[in-house]
Image (cartoon, grey):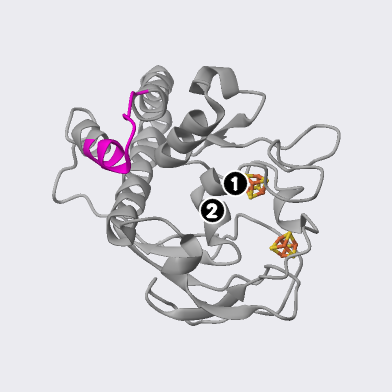
Amino acid sequence: MSGQTPERPAARTGAHSARRMTSREMARIASPGCEGCGICCRGMGDTIRLDPMDVWRLTAALGAPFSDLLDRVIGLHAEEGLVLPHMRMDGATDACALLGADGRCSLHASRPGICRLFPLGREYEGETFRYFFPEEGCPRQDLRKVRICDWIGLPEIDRYERFVGKWHALVRRQQALAGKAIASGHDDWARRRAMQLLQDFYTADFGVTEDDFYRTFEAICGEKPWSRPSRDRDGGQVES
Ligand code: SF4
Ligand code: SF4
């Protein structure tokens, strides 16, 4: 499956292009003079999806377990048979729970992957992906060129990207299984599997260092029911 479904609506910039990039390429995305207009952190609904590494970083930075952050910082949404976390928007202001009064992220160093990516999106093909410019992004006109991996700002970018691709494929696979189960009347099975995914990948003890995280993630992926049959392949999908 292929298509474009931007998940982080913001002001239209006309920056959309067919160009697909690796993280080693340069792109005009840096907003060094960002005035904290907050456009990229408001009104996002459930679109700032959180992967297990995002939640691991947030729980460490905020010193609270996943369960304590639910409803305060993190929301849950149903997505094709799964229940997945996202950054929660405040009911009154429609701003992300971590957006500071100055219009800037109060947890910048630990912000989620989708926030690091902004204004780029990711287009997936199986367990790999490329970066692209969605139709919508930062409205500033003076964006500067920067290497994408520097913009994302995480150590061991190759390892991080392997994790992102693997997680995306695992989610797609579980969504396909959930869809089949629901279509054949096995809603309870789908619900139990969705809860198990949430528990195994979002509440596990992933350790302290990035190396701890990646090793633990691989270990969980290798266990039933998450280990992947080699014949199972996902189609492409985009996220931004
Ligand atoms: S939309 Fe652009 S200028 Fe506004 S807060 Fe986000 S990065 Fe800064
Ligand atoms: S986590 Fe930070 S960067 Fe991401 S939407 Fe919230 S305030 Fe904005």
Q: Which one is in front, 227 or 89?
A: 89
Residue 106 coordinates in the image, percent (x, y): 67, 42
Q: Is mark 2 within 8 Å of ligand 2?
A: yes
Whether residue 172 is situated above or below residue 237 in the rendered picture: above
On the question of residue 3 being in view, the answer is no
Judged left or right of residue 81, residue 200 is left
SS assignment at label 2: helix
Q: Which one is in front, 160 or 16?
A: 160
Quadrant of the snapshot with the C terminus:
bottom right
Residue 151: in magenta span = no
Q: Name the quadrant containing residue 220.
A: top left
Q: Residue furthest left?
A: 230
Q: How many marks?
A: 2
Say which residue appears at 31% left-offset and 49% top-offset.
Answer: 163
Q: Which one is in front, 106 or 119?
A: 106
Distance of label 1 from label 2 (alpha carbons): 6 Å
Say which residue appears at 40% left-offset and 23% top-offset.
Answer: 203
Residue picked out by circle 2: 114
Crowd band around label 2 with a 10 angstrom C-alpha radius: few (<14), some (14–19), many (20+): many
**Circle number at residue 106:** none
Residue 151 coordinates in the image, percent (x, y): 50, 66
Cβ–Cβ under 8 Å for marks 1 and 2: yes
Q: Amino acid at mark 1?
A: Ile
- For the magenta stretch, what is the residue range? 204-215
Say which residue appears at 46% left-offset and 71% top-offset.
Answer: 148
SS assignment at label 1: loop
Ligand 1 lies in quarter: bottom right
Q: Residue furthest right?
A: 92
Say which residue appears at 18% left-offset and 29% top-offset.
Answer: 223
Whether residue 13 is situated above or below residue 182 in the rendered picture: below
Residue picked out by circle 1: 48
